[in-house]
Image: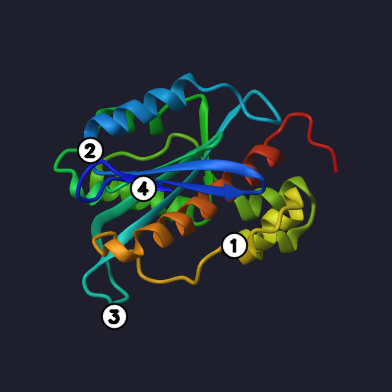
């Protein structure tokens, strides 16, 4: 199901692990502000009272065949509860202050794969990042006392930590070009599965009552 707010803004609904997930893709400041407010009001996670958010970014390249990354963040992805917010950051002349404050919140933890590199790029190119950022592979290896988990991909780690297999639901990977209308639903699904998985893994690993 999808509905449009404008040229690039749209909403998709996905069913992941028997849960209905609402994904909002936006380049509108008021939409970002509303969703950040909803994240701030939302209740604690399933496993503990710490708010753990799935976090990811996609960066523009100079051309589709280039390996060099530009200084612009194409999109920033967030997940909590049953909501995914995809912010088309490159479309903003000024980054919404609500997003900056949210990422700097001392009581929130943002988890992902390659998150330290992504945060470093945000800090270098935009002047802000996450106050609390955690790499999931090393976290899993430490908590579960299985060093090889550091090298697992997201689908493997989700299965090892949560017993959830979403590998078959992930569309084939392709370039994140949100301007191509026909690709938007697939792009939204790829992004949603990733940050949903990050959130689920991180929430369980960071639970105070974790038991192996």
- Badge 2 crowding class, 10 Å Cα cut-off, few under 14, some 14 to 19, many 20 or more, is some
Decide if residue 23 is on the left or right side of residue 123: right
Q: Residue 114: x percent and y percent?
A: 49, 57
Asked if disc 1 and disc 3 are in contact, CB closer than 8 Å, the reply is no
For disc 1, the marked residue is 169
| In this rendering, the label closer to the viewer, 4 or 2 | 2
Residue drawn at (76%, 52%), measured in percent from left and top?
A: 163
For disc 2, the marked residue is 28
How many numbered marks does the figure carry? Answer: 4
**Lower position in the chain sequence, tag 1 or tag 3:** 3
**Lower position in the chain sequence, tag 3 or tag 4:** 3
Mark-to-mark CA distance, 3 and 2:
29 Å
The local secondary structure at tag 2 comes to: loop
Residue drawn at (40%, 71%), measured in percent from left and top?
A: 174
| In this rendering, the label closer to the viewer, 1 or 3 | 1
- Between 17 and 49, the one lying in front of the other is 17
**Lower position in the chain sequence, tag 1 or tag 2:** 2
Q: Residue 9: x percent and y percent?
A: 27, 45
The local secondary structure at tag 1 comes to: helix
Q: Quadrant of residue 199?
A: top right
**Lower position in the chain sequence, tag 4 or tag 2:** 2
For disc 4, the marked residue is 76
């Amino acid at each position: 199901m999808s509905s449009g707010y404008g040229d690039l803004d749209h909403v998709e609904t996905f069913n992941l692990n028997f849960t209905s997930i609402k994904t909002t893709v936006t380049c509108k400041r008021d939409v970002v502000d509303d969703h950040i407010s909803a994240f701030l009001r939302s209740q604690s996670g399933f496993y503990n009272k710490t708010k753990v958010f799935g976090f990811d970014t996609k960066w523009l390249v100079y051309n589709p065949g280039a390996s060099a990354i530009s200084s612009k963040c194409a999109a920033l992805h967030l997940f909590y509860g049953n909501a995914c917010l995809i912010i088309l950051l490159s479309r903003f002349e000024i980054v919404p202050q609500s997003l900056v404050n949210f990422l700097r919140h001392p009581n929130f933890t943002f988890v992902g794969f390659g998150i330290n590199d992504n945060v470093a790029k945000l800090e270098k190119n935009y002047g802000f990042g996450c106050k609390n950022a955690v790499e999931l592979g090393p976290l899993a290896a430490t908590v579960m006392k299985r060093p090889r988990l550091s090298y697992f991909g997201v689908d493997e780690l989700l299965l090892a930590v949560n017993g959830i297999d979403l590998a078959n639901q992930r569309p084939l990977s392709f370039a994140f070009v949100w301007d191509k209308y026909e690709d938007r639903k697939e792009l939204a699904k790829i992004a949603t599965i990733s940050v949903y998985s990050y959130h689920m893994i991180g929430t369980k690993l960071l639970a105070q009552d974790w038991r192996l």
